[in-house]
Amino acid sequence: MLRELSVQNLALIEDVRVELAPGFCAWTGETGAGKSLLLGAIGLLLGERGTAEHIRAGQDELRVTGRFELTRPEQRVVAGDLLQTTLPDDELVLTRRLGRSGRSSALVNEQPVSVATLRRLGEMLVDVHGQRESYSLLQPAYQLELLDAFGKLTDLRQAYVTAADTVRDLRRRHKELTEARQTRLRELALARFERDELDAAGLKLGEWDAIQKEREKLLHAQSLCAFTGSVADRLYDAEGSVAVVLGRLIKEAGKWAGLDKRLADVAKRLETLKPEVQDLADTCRDLSESFEANPERLDEIESRLQAMKKLEAKYGKSIPDLITYRGTLDAKERDLRQQEDDLAGIDGTLRKAFAQLKDAAAVLGKGRAKVAKKLAAEAQKHLADLGMPKARLDALIEPVSLGDDPNVGDVPVAGTDHLELMLTANPGEPGRPLRKVASGGELSRTMLALKTVLAAHDPVRTLVVFDEIDANVGGRLGDVLGQKLSALGKSHQVLCVTHLPQVASYATHHWTIRKQSTAKRTSTTITHLTDRTARVEELAMMLRGEARSETTLKEAAEMLKAAAS
């Protein structure tokens, strides 16, 4: 419910703040005092379009703030979903600003939001009757929602919604797979080609380094052979080799060892070098024989290295990365083949889901057809009470075909039924869709009749605003209107702008709106009439204006007493 409304710089309104209450709230006042402006302020707060013309003369910005109390858990859930956040408490503070330049901004709990979000919140919080573009009950989706709640068809509706979601998901998947098929087939062919190419290459970890070393050996085979042969010659085989010199030194050391024992040790150490020199010479001789040119093997290695370089350049990856990449190709091929299998199998799944959707829609539609007649009949009883005894209200439900092709056509959000509320206001006149009824008074009374019937079935929109509901209505009917609004006020917060004292007398809370003028400016005020005397005075003013008398005051007091009883 709306707990507080604050308006600054809206046309005649300079600065008005009003605290509202639960139940039936009446706003009264003379024509032109600003009642419509305050309703317009609520409209701006709920996301309606505003222009710079709304801004009070001499000011740069208008501002409207509303503090809403979320009295039902369903409201918190819906509001949290719209704002994509968890609400910390049961309160929403909506703010709308409009600048002279035309710039508009919106805040919810001090956080910036789009005006579109504000509008969606407004549709959730408030049901407005009087400004035709805001009639939620004229919206087909809302009509179906309330019809399902009224007829206890929520489970059937949810079954349809679940089936519809399944069909949409399958269609989306089918579309994605179909649109991507050519790309997928190219990717599949490429994956298979790359797999075969890399398998044929037979890449191994460490191979590159190994054959690079082998290549270097083959390139320098003659030099290596010459070097190791030379070492063998110089150590052992040639004249004047290290072995010959070493033998000569060993003999001389032995000859002189008798003169000095230390030379005996030298002779021994020289002796120990002899086998090492011989072994090293043998090793180099063997190595010399192993280093031989092999042009054919060198050509093989050069070809292998060239092939590996081409693969690196082609794929933009090193040999180790190519080996890793080859390991991913099998999984990629399996995934692409699976997508092809999915596309082949999804048709059957979609056809089955589409058939289930049609069945769910048919069951829901059948239930709605029964409930719609009951809704129209109950609302028509209230229309008779509201001064439209000859009026006829019909709820026509027409099925919308889903077609026969599971892959095409719209899938309606809430069922395949088109609900049209038809009003025949007077005998002999053709029935007209409720959304096309021209008379504001007839439309508002029809809305009140429907709202009275559906009041217990709308757990979200707990504030109902009525304007023009007493248009072309006399005092006797005003009494009935007041009773209906008072009854609705037991389950909803009802805000009604009225010119009839009979209607206002039934209000749980009553405010009067006045226009005050000074030499320089005119402004609007709103006053909560909290005591009986003030209310009697206002009702008397509504009855006779400035010509009110003691008799008028007594009449007003009796009116208030009768309404209370």
Image (tube, rainbow, N blue to C red):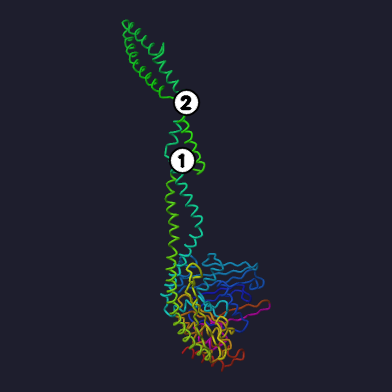
Q: Is there CB contact under 8 Å for labels 1 and 2?
A: no
Image quarter for residue 150?
bottom left
Give how far across and how far down residue 527 sits, in percent: 56, 80
Residue found 51% across the figure and 40% down from its top: 310
Instruction: Write the start and end of the magenta stretch as one range.
Output: 496-519
Residue 541 in view, yes or no: no
Among the 4 quarters of the image, the one containing residue 356: bottom left
Element at label 2? loop
517 magenta-colored: yes
Helix, strand or loop at disc 1? helix
Residue 89 sits inside the magenta stretch: no
- Amino acid type at image mark 2: His
Residue 422: where, in percent of width, then height?
53, 84
Residue lying farthest right? 519
- Residue at x 43%, y 33% (from the top left corner): 210
Q: Is residue 127 visible?
A: yes
Give residue 280's mark: none
Tell me if residue 407 comes above or below residue 187 in the rendering.
below
Q: Which mark is residue 319?
A: 1
Q: Which residue is mark 2?
A: 220
Query: Which-is-in-front pick, marks 1 and 2?
Result: 2
Number of marks: 2
* Separation of residues labelled 1 and 2 (CA atoms): 26 Å
Q: Position of residue 460 (x, y in %)?
A: 47, 75
1 or 2: tag closer to the N-terminus: 2
Residue 419 or residue 504, whichever sits in front: 419
Question: In the figure, 317 relative to 336: above or below?
Answer: above
